[in-house]
Every structure is written in structure tokens, then in C-alpha cells.
Image (spheres, rainbow, N blue to C red):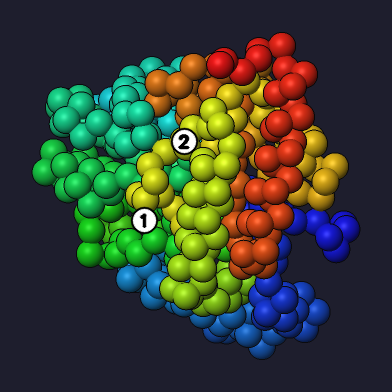
């Protein structure tokens, strides 16, 4: 990869921090045994101690008990286990599930899979900024509602939901509540232990940790059914040899995120939004100006296609993403922007910029200059044309 690449797709994945790699190394080349009990050989005991220390460190960050946290292969598996595991465990009590229209695919597709098995799914509306309709949630809860899953923040537009209020509504209605915190864990404070949150998905790859490792908070007493048959690992909820190097790396990545870093991400985000909206005509910020994740800026450039912008920026040394169909391996435009009332033109013209630890304010200056030129060039040849 070119050293000159400016990587601004940190919501998709982040570069692993060197300190995370160093923390993982001993569990790759020295303490490489599987985690075993106290009456087995010493190498296995050491491996188990590393795994449990990682679990304890992450649980402390979440303000939960280590026994309430299991490691998974990532956010996708965590959300699948949360929705399908609870649905199967609770099917004698009801078959109604509530999500929002703009959930990430692990929740969205899990809910759709459950529909095929006879469960009924309600998808809540969101407003033009992507915020869930709280009154609709209250009205949609029924006697047979067994689970609500609302993300803490959106993966595309960065909108942060009012999880405190949503979780309290679910508690009052005796409905199990799950939140996908993949894009907010360590970035936006959320005290999982002090809120009526029953399950929460988190992942490592969005905070400069390794891919292939994530976790699921399962509040003590939450009914959930195992989805992967095999051994008895992870409280007998997730069979398979534990990814100990990944778990240790995840814990280290969690430790390294600071409030100063989050403020720096926010400063870069705000600088980019301000510059693009003021310098380039016919642009729309997707999501709210302030109540969004510190690393996210999603902007629609009208009269041009997002994939065209992305390709031209790539040739200039920038990595960004788009909600356009060609890049999503789908025939549909971004379900998020459509779900918040945007049309196909707005969805296809959207570009997501997401910042990480290894970005600086100079990257903002570079991308703003380049995208101004790219958009101007593309609009000159666009069949859509810019309105006068």
C-alpha cells in the first residue's frame, strides 16, 4: 500500500495499532496452547489466564461483570447470536421483534431470517436525521413482543440514538433490549452496567484492534440459546477454540482509546463538514450536525454518483466509501438514506468519510481540496446536470 494513501474509511476497518500487535505476539509464538483448566499443563493455564484477563479488562471498560461477556468472531456473530438466540429462547412467550429501518446488516438480516421462521418483525421509522421514532416504539410494543434491537449509532451516517430512553421503555414493558455498539464502544460513553441494556454487540476492528474478534455482553439472567454446537467454551454459548491472541489484542485496543483521541477525531470531522458544506455547492450532510459519532461525516454530493467520486479519489490516493449500489454488492441503494426519507439520487451520491488514530488535520485539508476538484470535474460531464 502506498505510504501516501490517506485512509478515511475507518468505520469499515482500522489499521491495527503496533502496541496491539506487540500485546498479541506472545500468544501467537509462546503461549500458543488452547485455554485449559487449572489441572492441565502450564502452557494451557497461561493461555487461559491471558484470555480471562482480556475478558476482565473489556468488562471493566463496559462496567459489567466478566461473566456477562463472551468473545465472538466479531460484530456479525454477536448480533446474530443476540437476536436468534433470544428469539429461540423466548418463542414460547411471543414472536414479535422490533428493530429500526436503518440497522446494520447483521441485525437487519437476522431479523429477516427470523421472519422466515414465523417471527413477526416491526421496523421503526426514523426522522430525516436518522433518529428512531420514540413514540412509535412505545406504540408498537405488544404483549407478545420479546425483543427490541436498536443500534447505538448508525454505521453509515453516524447518528447516535437515545439508548437511555429506548432501554428504559423496554425495561418498563418487560422487553429484552439489544444494542449494536460496534461504532460507539470506547468512542461515546455508555455505561452498560447501569442501564437496562440486556445485550450489546462490540467489535475490535473499528478501534485499531485485530479483525476476527468481537464480543457480546449478555446481562445475567437474560434468556438466550446457544447457536453454534460443539464444545463448552464461552459459558457454553459459543463453541470453538478461543481466539486468545485476538482477545488480548481487543483488550489492548480498548485500553488505548482516550478521550483526547476522540476529541481529535471530532475536530477533524467538524472541519471536514464545515469545509465541504461551505466550499462545495449542492451538498447535504446526512445525519445530524452534532449528535453523531466523533469519527463520521457522511455527505451527499448532488448530481454525481458516489462511486464515481470514490474511484476518482482513489486515483488521487484517498480511501473513502459510498452507499452506492455498485459498492455494496447489492442492486439497491443505501437502505439507511432511503430509510430516513432520502431519494435514490441522494443515496447514490453519498460518500462516507471516517477518521481514525492515524489521521491528522492535514488529511482533512488534502481531501477537501481534492474532492472539490473531483466533484467539479464530474458535474461538468454529469448527465444529471446541476440546477441553476
Q: Position of residue 50 (x, y in %)?
A: 59, 80
Q: Which mark is nearer the camera, 1 or 2?
A: 2
Horizontally, is 348 left or right of 94 in the view?
A: right
Q: Residue furthest top?
A: 383
Image vertical order of residue 12 relative to residue 185, above or below:
above
Real-space Cα separation, disc 1 to disc 2, in angstroms: 32 Å
Q: Please tell me which residue is depicted at 69% across the width and 41% down the height of the picture.
A: 371
According to the image, label 1 marks what residue? 218
Side (left or right) of 149 relative to 343: left
In which image quadrant can residue 56 be found? bottom left
User: In which quadrant will I find the C terminus?
Assistant: top right
Q: Which residue is disc 2 drawn over?
A: 286
Horizontal arrangement in the rendering, residue 90 relative to residue 342 (left or right): left
- Residue at horizontal 40%, vertical 26%? 340
Secondary structure of residue under mark 1 = strand
The N terminus sits in image quarter: bottom right
User: Circle 2 — which element?
Assistant: loop
Q: Residue furthest bottom?
A: 42
Amino acid at each position: 500500500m502506498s505510504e501516501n494513501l490517506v485512509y478515511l474509511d475507518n468505520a469499515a476497518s482500522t489499521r491495527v495499532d503496533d502496541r496491539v500487535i506487540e500485546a498479541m505476539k506472545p500468544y501467537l509464538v509462546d503461549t500458543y496452547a488452547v485455554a485449559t483448566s487449572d489441572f492441565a499443563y502450564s502452557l494451557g493455564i497461561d493461555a487461559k489466564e491471558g484470555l480471562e484477563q482480556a475478558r476482565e479488562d473489556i468488562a471493566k471498560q463496559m462496567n459489567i461483570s466478566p461473566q456477562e461477556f463472551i468473545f465472538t468472531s466479531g460484530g456479525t456473530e454477536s448480533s446474530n447470536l443476540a437476536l436468534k438466540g433470544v428469539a429461540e429462547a423466548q418463542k414460547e412467550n411471543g414472536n414479535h421483534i422490533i428493530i429500526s429501518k436503518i440497522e446494520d446488516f447483521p441485525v437487519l438480516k437476522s431479523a429477516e431470517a427470523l421472519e422466515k421462521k414465523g417471527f413477526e418483525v416491526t421496523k421503526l421509522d426514523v426522522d430525516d436525521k436518522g433518529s428512531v421514532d420514540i413514540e412509535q416504539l412505545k406504540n408498537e410494543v405488544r404483549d407478545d413482543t420479546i425483543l427490541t434491537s436498536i443500534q447505538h449509532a448508525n454505521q453509515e451516517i453516524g447518528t447516535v440514538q437515545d439508548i437511555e430512553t429506548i432501554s428504559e421503555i423496554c425495561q418498563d414493558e418487560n422487553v429484552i433490549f439489544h444494542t449494536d455498539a460496534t461504532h460507539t464502544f470506547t468512542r461515546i460513553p455508555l455505561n452498560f452496567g447501569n442501564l437496562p441494556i440486556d445485550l450489546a454487540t462490540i467489535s475490535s476492528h473499528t478501534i485499531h484492534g485485530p479483525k476476527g474478534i468481537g464480543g457480546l455482553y449478555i446481562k445475567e439472567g437474560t434468556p438466550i440459546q446457544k447457536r453454534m454446537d460443539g464444545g463448552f467454551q464461552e459459558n457454553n454459548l459459543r463453541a470453538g477454540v478461543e481466539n486468545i491472541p485476538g482477545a488480548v489484542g481487543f483488550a489492548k485496543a480498548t485500553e488505548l482509546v482516550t478521550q483526547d483521541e476522540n476529541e481529535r477525531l471530532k475536530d477533524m470531522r467538524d472541519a471536514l463538514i464545515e469545509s465541504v458544506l461551505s466550499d462545495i455547492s449542492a451538498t447535504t450532510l446526512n445525519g445530524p450536525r452534532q449528535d453523531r459519532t466523533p469519527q463520521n461525516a457522511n455527505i451527499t454530493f448532488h448530481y454525481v454518483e458516489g462511486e464515481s467520486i470514490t474511484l476518482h479519489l482513489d486515483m488521487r490516493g484517498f480511501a473513502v466509501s459510498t452507499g452506492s449500489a455498485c459498492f455494496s454488492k447489492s442492486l439497491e441503494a443505501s437502505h439507511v438514506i432511503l430509510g430516513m426519507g432520502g431519494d435514490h439520487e441522494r443515496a447514490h451520491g453519498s460518500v462516507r468519510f471516517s477518521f481514525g488514530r492515524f489521521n491528522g488535520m492535514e488529511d482533512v485539508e488534502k481531501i477537501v481540496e481534492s474532492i472539490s476538484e473531483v466533484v467539479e470535474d464530474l458535474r461538468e460531464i454529469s448527465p444529471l446536470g446541476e440546477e441553476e
